Amino acid sequence: MNELHEKRKAAQGSATRQLAIWTTAWLLSQALLTFGSKLFWAHSDMANGLALILYLAMGFKMVLANRNLLKSLDELERQLQLESMAVTLGLTLVVGLGFSTLDIINMIPFDAEISYLVIFMGLSYLTTLLINKKRYQ
Amino acid sequence: MKNRIRDLRVQKSWTQEDLAQAIGVSRQTINAIEKGKFDPSLPTAFRLSLLFETKIEEIFSFEED
């Protein structure tokens, strides 16, 4: 039955590489969308539209690659990832909306930028994953 | 859920890594199952049953948490 182990490892390796490739492509398409208008095509709506379509397509492929990686994981690891995602989703909703409301009612001296939320998501995902890993040890 | 996986594994002088490789899961998964912290999927339970040549109900016993 050792071939099961080899198959799982190979599938996981391939899924990880695919995710790395599509994440890089998505980041590059984001850079193109952000800087393309200024640097390459002088605010053309057509070019901006095409860059947006490319960005969405790359993002969609990245999401699918992430789902495939999740499917290739060992069952305990998959459960850890899913639990961490669930907690992160809930926290993002609660903290994100709360943060935005604080901005609306002027209780914070700066704008509630989306980048703060992305950083918060990353940190909460990492923290929850570490806690979950400890729980199942 | 309780199980006898540790006993069955030790009887065969296997390490957790040996058992993990044999049924296609990680060593951490075997460790969590043995400690009763994680209930395996049905395919994994069947693989354990085949490997140890023991009925599933003789490996696992159900207990409400």
Image (cartoon, coloured by chain):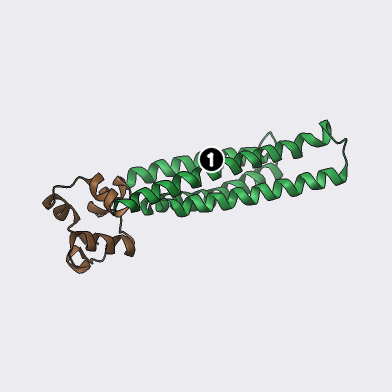
Chain colours: A green, B brown
Q: Residue furthest front?
A: A3
Give x and y (percent) for residue A16.
Answer: 50, 43
- Image point 30% across, 51% down: which residue? A2
Is any part of residue A105 visible from this angle?
no
Instruction: Check disc 1: other Cα within 10 Å, few if <14, some if 14-19, many if 20+.
Output: few
Question: Quadrant where the C terminus of chain B lies?
Answer: bottom left
Q: Which one is in front, A89 or B20? A: B20
Drawn side of residue A55 relative to residue B33, left or right? right
Residue placed furthest toward the left? B11
Secondary structure found at label 1 = helix
Q: Position of residue A130 (x, y in %)?
A: 40, 41
- Give the labeled residue for mark 1: A122
Residue at left 36%, top 48%?
A6
Q: Chain of mark 1?
A: A
- Foreground of the two, A85 or B17: B17
Residue A85 coordinates in the image, percent (x, y): 49, 50
Compare residues A124 and A29 and report the one nearer the observer.
A29
**How many numbered tags mark residues here?**
1
What residue is shown at x 36% (from left), y 52% (from top)?
A76
Residue A25 visible, this angle: yes
Amino acid type of the residue that numbered disc 1 sits on in the rendered structure: Gly
Task: Identify the residue at the far top of this view.
Answer: A39
Would residue A100 be found to the left or right of residue A81 on screen? right
**Quadrant position of the N terminus of chain B in the picture:** bottom left
Q: In the figure, B35 relative to A24: above or below?
A: below
Question: Considering only vertical position in the picture, is B4 above or below A17?
Answer: below
Residue B27 position, x and y percent, is 29, 46
